[in-house]
Image: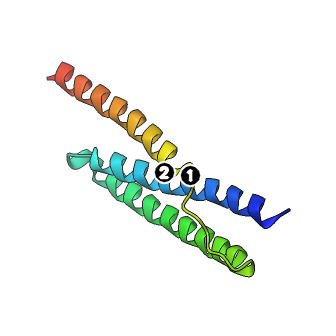
Amino acid sequence: MSNEILIRGLNDDLAAELGTVIRYLHQAAQCYGLLTVELRELLVKEAQDELGHAAYLMDVMSEVGLAKGRSPTTPENLQRVVDKAAQVLAGATRQRKEQCSAAS
């Protein structure tokens, strides 16, 4: 496997990890009230785990890139992942607000 293919795959993995961090933090921010304290703490902890995965991937990318005298690039599909996560979360937030309004 060439370094280019490896880095491209690692970039995709990195984008997924960072997208997951954003999703977990957004979901944690949507948790409010006494019944959701534990869920919020769990989501924040999971986001920290995902950051650890992202850091590991960057370490691997740096080693592969440095072997050829270059550094890793920003994940090419990160913006697409972030945009999709934002759309999904906006829809979920809207649905949650509608449910809360209907229950009142």
Tag 2, which secondary structure? helix
Relative horizontal placement of residue 17, taking residue 1 as reference (left or right): left
Q: Which residue is mark 1?
A: 16
- Residue 18 in the image: state x and y as whole percent: 49, 56
> Looking at numbered disc 1 in the image, what kind of residue is underneath it?
Ala
Quarter of the image where one finds residue 42: bottom left
Q: Please tell me whether residue 61 is drawn above or below residue 41 in the rendered image.
A: below
Tag 1, which secondary structure? helix
Name the residue at the front extreme. 69
Name the residue at the top extreme. 102
Residue at 52% x, 69% y: name it: 52
Which one is nearer the viewer's eye here, 24 or 68?
68
Q: Please tell me whether residue 50 is drawn above or below residue 65 in the rendered image.
A: above
Residue at 46% x, 38% y: name it: 84
Residue at 41% x, 52% y: name it: 22
Q: Residues within 10 Å of mark 1 (few under 14, many from 20)?
A: some
Which one is nearer the viewer's eye here, 34 or 102?
102
Alpha-carbon distance for marks 1 and 2? 5 Å
Q: Residues within 10 Å of mark 2 (few under 14, many from 20)?
A: many
Q: Quadrant of the C terminus?
A: top left
Q: Which residue is mark 2?
A: 19
Relative horizontal placement of residue 13, taking residue 43 as reference (left or right): right
Relative horizontal placement of residue 28, taking residue 4 as reference (left or right): left
- Residue 2 in the image: state x and y as whole percent: 83, 64
Instruction: Tell me which colouring the rendered structure shows.
Output: rainbow
Relative horizontal placement of residue 33, taking residue 68 as reference (left or right): left
Name the residue at the right extreme. 1
